[in-house]
Image (spheres, helix red, strand yellow):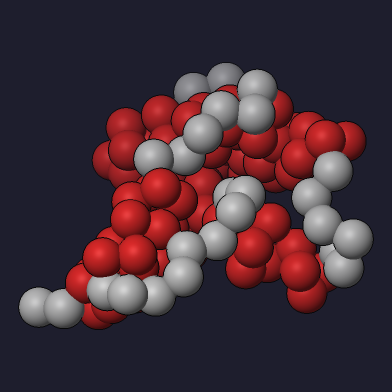
Amino acid sequence: MSYSLLADLVLLAHLGFIAFVGGGGLLVARWPRLIWLHLPLAAWGAAVEIANLPCPLTPLENSLRQSAGEAGYAGDFIGHYLLAVIYPEGLTRPVQIGLGLLVIAMNLVVYAWVIRRWRQRTGIA
């Protein structure tokens, strides 16, 4: 398998991770056991944004791209692939913190709905 293909797979995994962090609570409503996977991943995703922690997938993708003879990129995944389209100026610290808080807020709303639904089904007040 080529390094370029591996880098593309890491890119897809990274995008899947971001989608799961943002919307995985909705999957928990359907498959409650996913809560044990979603909560720690959502916490990690929010922490990466709020605390400006490095995500290990970005350097892995860059390393694979460089091994394939391609150019890597500076910065992070969101700044390189997503914010270039949404926010042409790039990723600023306030936007990054806002994204982390948005992850938390979205998941709080979804989990409140999931818990309310679970309580109604089980008859627990």
The answer to whether 10 is drawn above or below residue 75 in the figure is: below
Quarter of the image holding residue 50?
top right
Marks counted in the figure total 0
Q: Is residue 27 visible?
A: no
> In the image, residue 96 lies at what x, y percent?
76, 40
Q: Tell which of 20 and 5 is nearer to you.
A: 5
> In the image, residue 4 lies at what x, y percent?
28, 77
The residue drawn where x is 55% and y is 61% is 73
Q: Is residue 35 visible?
A: yes
> In the image, residue 64 lies at what x, y percent?
29, 62
Quarter of the image holding residue 115?
top right
Q: Tell which of 4 and 100 is nearer to you.
A: 4
The residue drawn where x is 82% and y is 57% is 90
The residue drawn where x is 76% and y is 69% is 84
Instruction: For the C terminus, give its image quadrant.
Output: top right
Q: Residue furthest front?
A: 69
The answer to whether 47 is drawn above or below residue 5 in the figure is: above
Instruction: For the N terminus, give its image quadrant.
Output: bottom left
> In the image, residue 63 lies at what x, y percent?
33, 56
